[in-house]
Image (cartoon, rainbow, N blue to C red):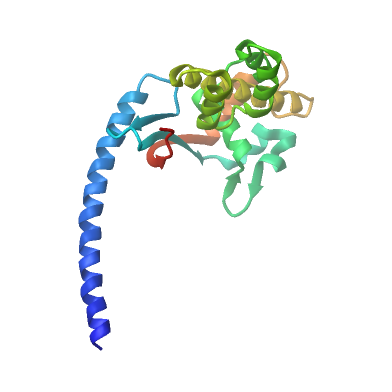
Amino acid sequence: MTDIRKKVDMYVTLKTKQSLLQEDISAMEADILKHGEELLADTKYKSVRIIGESNSRAVSVTNAETLKVTYPSLLKDIFGKVYADCVKEEITYTVNAHGKRILISLLTGAYNAGESLERLVDNVSVDKKTNKILSKKLKGINFDTDKRTLMNVCGMGEETASDYAYMAMEAVAWQNINNLMKINDVEDSPIPAGNNNLSVLKEKTVRSAAVDQTVKVSIIDIDV
């Protein structure tokens, strides 16, 4: 009986501390988020790193994009023949990661028409060895991973690497959109052939889905 009473005392003490700590954490997180959003404002970057005074700890503030499908019946028109590959039909519509990237790119305009990842790698590479490494590691999918790759492989500074990481994402986004249009560019396609493909695709996407943007803070490792 005495043991459980001690545990009750300890439990209440810890829960009280936890509540107070959570208040402090929430207040600090709000300040960090505000500062991070200011740093990300008027940039195309997806995340920014904020280093602590000790230079041994850091957080990243990330702009996360969440896709919400508003008119799921139009998804078949958008994805056409690859619908089953990009959308899993349930009671609710679930778009897989690849499909989400395509829809978010169309909704936000985060693509560079005519660009390719291969061309970007050629422009960045200083020699054949660098080209070979970047061709394997630069994916245009994860901003932070590509940024680290460019910093490590090419010796870029963080700002320059961020620029190229974003360009890689835009290039891959266009390749995905272009491939989607090519796959569905047939007579029975709901997306008509010709130069209007992209505008029609974007119009259908706007009518079928929307993007909610949220910001989160996460603890990350830092090289000292």
The reply, left or right, for residue 216 in relation to residue 78 is: left
Compare residues 129 and 138 and report the one nearer the observer: 129
The image quadrant of residue 34 is: top left
**Location of residue 103 in the rendering, given as x and y in whole percent from the top left corner:** 57, 32
Q: In the picture provided, is 126 more to the left or to the right than 1? A: right
Left-right relation of 173 to 60: right
Q: Position of residue 99 (x, y in %)?
A: 62, 36
What percent of the width, then of the height, locates residue 132? Answer: 70, 21
Residue drawn at the location 71% of the way across and 25% of the way down: 179
Of residue 32 and residue 213, the one placed in the foreground of this image is: 32
- Where in the figure is residue 62, as x and y percent of width and height? 41, 34
Residue drawn at (28%, 30%), measured in percent from left and top? Answer: 35
> Residue at point 33% right, 30% down?
36
On-image quarter of the C terminus: top left
Q: Is residue 78 above or below residue 88?
A: above
Q: How many marks?
A: 0
The part of the image, by quadrant, that contains residue 77 is top right
For residue 116, say whether it is visible.
no
In the figure, residue 201 lies in which quadrant?
Answer: top right
Q: Is residue 66 among what the camera can see?
A: yes
Q: Residue furthest right?
A: 187
Residue 14, relative to residue 85: is it above or below? below
Q: Looking at this rendering, what residue extends furthest in the bottom direction?
A: 1
View extreme (front): residue: 224
Quarter of the N terminus within the rendering: bottom left
